[in-house]
Amino acid sequence: MGSLSYLAVLIACLAVTAPLEWGIGVRVYRQPRRLGLTLVLAMTPFVVWDVVAILRDHWSFAAERTIGVNLAGIMPLEELLFFVVIPICALLTHQAVLRLGARRWPDGRLARELAALRPDAGGE
């Protein structure tokens, strides 16, 4: 399992959050254009940062934990997939919290309480 470790963690993350799409109906996958734009915006700075850090030897990846496919000879495929999978899982979770909150408090109280938590909302 060693060379599949990183990939296995990513698959587990998707498996754990997938029921949120179909069971709760958060509609993240059903909006591919919006999801794609979100991923590009989220991925770009982190992929650049990651590549720079790898090239500067700030960090590296254990070859025995990856499948051995390196993009441009620099970044393991699993690392790029990380920047796709984790934001998707975060979006699924965020949308599930909003959807369940809307069901529990249909009067909009959850939305008002969340808005009040924003740093710019308190007038501080």
Image (spheres, rainbow, N blue to C red):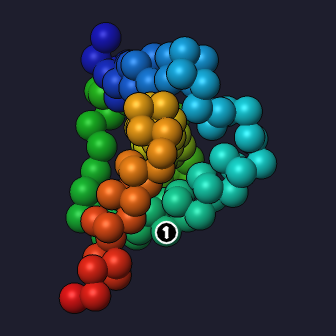
Furthest residue to the front? 107
Q: Quadrant of residue 52?
A: bottom left
Q: Position of residue 113 (x, y in %)?
A: 33, 57
Residue 75 seen in the current view:
no
Q: Is residue 101 visible?
A: yes
- What is the three-letter code of the residue carrying label 1? Pro
Side of 3 where 76 appears, left or right? right
34 sits to left or right of 51? right
- At horizontal 27% and vertical 37% (from top left) the residue drawn is 62
Quadrant into which the N terminus falls: top left
Residue 112 at x, y percent in the picture: 40, 59
Q: Residue at x 60, y 17 (%)?
A: 22
Q: Across the whole image, how many numbered discs are drawn on residues?
A: 1
SS at circle 1: helix
Left/right of residue 63 with respect to residue 32 in the rendered view: left
Q: Is residue 31 above or below residue 37?
A: above
Residue assigned mark 1: 45
Query: On the image, which quarter does residue 21 sit in?
Result: top right
Tell me: 39 left or right of 111.
right
Measuring 60% from the left and 52% from the top, which residue is drawn there? Answer: 39
23 or 70: which is nearer to us? Answer: 23
Q: Residue furthest right?
A: 33
- In this view of the protein, which residue sits in the foreground, 114 or 51? 114
Q: In which quadrant will I find the C terminus?
A: bottom left
In the rendered view, would you say 26 is above or below 5? Answer: below
**In the rendering, at what x and y percent does residue 68 appear?**
45, 31
